[in-house]
Image (tube, rainbow, N blue to C red):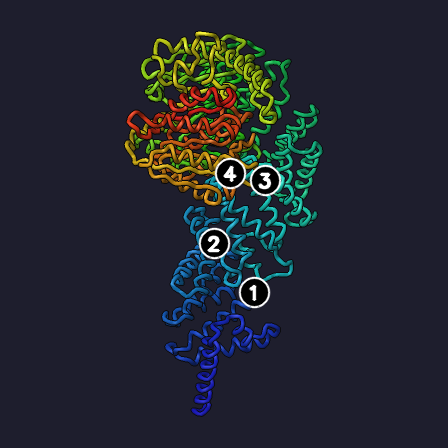
Amino acid sequence: MTSSQVGTRITGINWLLRWLCELMFSDTGFKPLALTRACFKEENEVDNLIARQYLGKVLEFSPPEHHLRAVVLTLRAISYNKRYSHANDVADLNLAIETYQLATEACPQVYLQHAHLLLQYALALQRRFTKLKDAGDLDLSINSSKQCWGCPGDLVITAWRSLALALDLRYRLRHGDKDLDDAIQFYALIVDLPSQDQVDPLFTRTGYAQALRMRFHRRGLVDDLNLAIHYFDLVVVIGCPPDDTSRSYLLGSLGFAPFLPPININYLAITLFTRYQLQGDKTDAHCARTYFQQALDLCPPGHIHHPDVLNNYACLLGRLSKEGISDPEDLELCIRYFYEALEHCYEPARSLILNHLALVLIFRFSRQGDPTDLDLASSLCQTALELRPEGHPHRPTTFLIQAKTVIERLTPKCTVVDIEIALGTLHAARETLPPGRPLLNEMYKELSSVYFLRHSVTKHSSDLEEAFKYRILATEKSSGGSRSQFEGAMKWVEDAKNFDHSSVLHAYKSAIHLLDLHLVLEPSVDLRHDIVKREALSLCAHATSCALRHQDTIDAVEMFEQSRDSGDLADRFENLSRQLDMPVTVGDDNQEAQRYRRVPREWNTVVDKIRAVNNFSNFLLPPSYNDLRAAAIGGPIIILNASRHSCDAIIVLAHGAPIHISFPENTFTNVLAMLSELRNLLCPLRWNNPNDEGGAKASERTLAGLLRRLWDTIVCDVVRGLEPHVSRNLRIWWCPTGQFTSLPLHAAAPWRKGEPGLSDISVSSYTPTLSALIRSRNKVHAFPGAPLSFVSIGQPNSYGYDELPTVLQELELVHELVPETIPFTTLCDETATCGAALSALSTHTSAHFACHGQQVPGQPFESHFAMHDGHLSPLDIIHSNLGPETEFAFLSACQTATGDSDAPDEVIHLAAALQFAGVRNVVGTTRSVEDSVVIHIVAAFYRGMIGGDGKFDPSRAARALRGAIKGTKDKVPLDQRIIFIHIGV
């Protein structure tokens, strides 16, 4: 080649490099696809080959230090990457990665192009990982992407997306918690960016939802589950065009391509089903069913995901059938879907579906009694065992299901030989389970049931003791979740009562402790209340009654209090507890035994640390009577307990043992009769007939008779028990449970000439629990002498309610009666908003409400004060940050101290909510108060709040209320006087 030719070639190379440089660093920025199309026509591989060869010549003749060499290397890497996309030859991908690496080394770091190259290098490494599964590629990709954190907006978003994917993939390979947390963090940074700024909304939302779902199954954080549902739902709503192939690489890496819509719908349905299993919200179950049906419609027979959707759908139908919230034909549909899924699936899914189907057949046998179902279930288990040889981690699951097929055949007429076969199968299954395995709880329950059956045949006491041994073990193993433990404890209670076993008190204590834990773990307040109505309604009463029948009054007080009072938990403790609460079912092979072994140790460590903190030594331990009796420092506390076994009173004193008063056997019937009569008497019929004086007097005589019966039936015996311990006019506190909560105990009187009533003997207050009273007393001691301030909150016109014409008059009266030396604020009409009320409660020591108050039966947390802009609920009050010096509140609203009639054991009303939130003295009403007469009570009450020194004293609230009720008997009807009560210190 002549010197002239060489010069021409060098000139050509320089010209090409300059042109490429201008294209690469143009004002519009680096556009890899545009540049690739300019140099390598997509439709012509011959042209692409010529271009690659020409670039090779350029690299061959350009010196290594040439400042534009990185440009040519970039183009060559793009060409290899493009050829890999067409031919799927890993050799091309290897060349692309090597060339990207050379390009990053050749490009100075000060250039923006260096960050572009790092990201292209990282993405190419991720592509190779999806092909070869070499974890080293992910490590290099992550390190490369991290170097781009300081880049401008668009590039850093791409880097976050790259890191989210790489960390997600590495977690799936190595299961490192930090990788999953970091992946979720990077997904979160980009998932809600505006669509024009986000790299790929479908990719980020899908990846984020799936990562959250994985972390939920690992740690049990309900917030992760809720977020996963939210983003799966967004993906399903947005959808993905079936011909969109641009996302196939990214989503394929996460296991979603090429059938995006049905897979995302399936995952949304699965996640909703999981939340239903955890929380029991039927809305989730119905939504999951709808989405499963949509996914099934999109996955007809022959579709790659058809068996998976069928299996998941059938699991939901089976669960709903067992819980009795689906149509009878759903059980048959469930079985059909399982059989259909078996026809198109392979291991490991096959053995899982065999287990699920066997369980459903066992359930159908329990309903229909066809032994063929048990034969089929046993055969399915045998097939599953063949697929799960010795050493298989899920072989014990199948063993347990097989044991169930044997147990279901047992009847009261079976022989000892039959029972021994069942026990042998169960013990064989148990031996295959390592310690800490979640299925142990289920195993212990089955063993206990079989030993009870053997005892019914042999009558041997040893069999009975074995049965109770396994009942106890089923409550002690946390690996099954708090719900499973609680159910086991309740079964233990039932059996102990039936057999009059010595462990009955121990069983009640365990059940109360586990119910308390289960309530703490339940994230939904409404569902927590449902649990109380469903489970705790009678547990407290029966446990207390049982202890009293065993002459153990101290245990009775301790169990009573533990079943009614839950303390607050630190965030970390709550998270750990929820991990232990993950639901476990026999047919679910997704057991994480390692997690269940690790989490209890950490849980116990955290609890020990909490107990080491001052004032937390009894954290999550049964309350000690020595601590509880501190509640009675200001006067005796009378616990009233009603169960179908007995009705009792327990008088708790500041010193000495509690006093037990047992009422006659017919007391419970009498209480129910008085409640029914009281409801009829206190209906506002008189309000509709204000001129019917004769009817009003007759009703008052009837009410007086009812209060006499209340005195004779309950209160008189309590007063006799109090006489040696209480002098006249001292304070007492009522702590009623069950049906007693709706009786006006404070107003009981003999109504016989010369005989004093309760209000003549003592000053009555109420408290929902002993601990609540202790907390209020402690606040008094912690904040003595805080400067007094007062706020009055009135709302005469609330949307949806009748006008309250005397509200303004009432607020003005309160203002007049409160001493001028106390700072006074008034919120009324449009200024009486929810936010303003909460703010005022947190900054004033005393408050007066004059507005409508509404109890919502069955949904106490929907109860509310009617404010100008909406409803102020108990949750709003409890969650607000009330000042530590908050002393007193008067609730001149309707129904502010009325509990839920369906759950009388749970005193959740507006007055109690204020006390729980920190207000030490609360006056409220148990029924609707008549607007025209309340003004008299208010006037007399606030005059009584002024002490002998002329100062306003919130601690006088209980005595002031008694004085107001006694002093207005000529102005206020009896049925209106008795509905005012005092709660607190």
Q: Secondary structure at mark 2?
A: helix
Looking at the image, is mark 2 or mark 1 earlier in the sequence?
Answer: 1
Looking at the image, is mark 4 or mark 1 earlier in the sequence?
Answer: 1
Q: Secondary structure at mark 1?
A: helix
Tell me the mark number nearer the camera, choosing from 2 and 1.
2
Question: Nearest the camera: 526 or 142?
Answer: 526
Q: Amino acid at mark 2?
A: Tyr
Residue 587, horizontal then vertical, whole percent: 58, 34
Residue position for label 1: 85
Looking at the image, is mark 3 or mark 1 earlier in the sequence?
Answer: 1
Q: Are marks 2 and 4 in contact (CB under 8 Å)?
A: no
Looking at the image, is mark 2 or mark 4 earlier in the sequence?
Answer: 2
Residue at left offset 65%, top offset 47%: 295
Q: Secondary structure at mark 3?
A: helix
Q: CA distance from mark 2 to mark 4?
A: 50 Å
Question: Nearest the camera: 411 or 518?
Answer: 518
Q: CA distance from mark 3 to mark 2?
A: 25 Å
Does the rendering let one see residue 498?
Answer: no
Q: Amino acid at mark 4?
A: Pro
Residue at left offset 48%, top offset 63%: 124
Residue position for label 4: 796
Tell me the mark number nearer the camera, choosing from 3 and 2.
3
Image position of 706 with respect to 844: above or below: above
Residue position for label 3: 284
Residue 75, horizontal then vertical, whole percent: 49, 73
Question: Nearest the camera: 889 or 670?
Answer: 889
Residue 442 numbered tag: none
Residue 187 numbered tag: 2
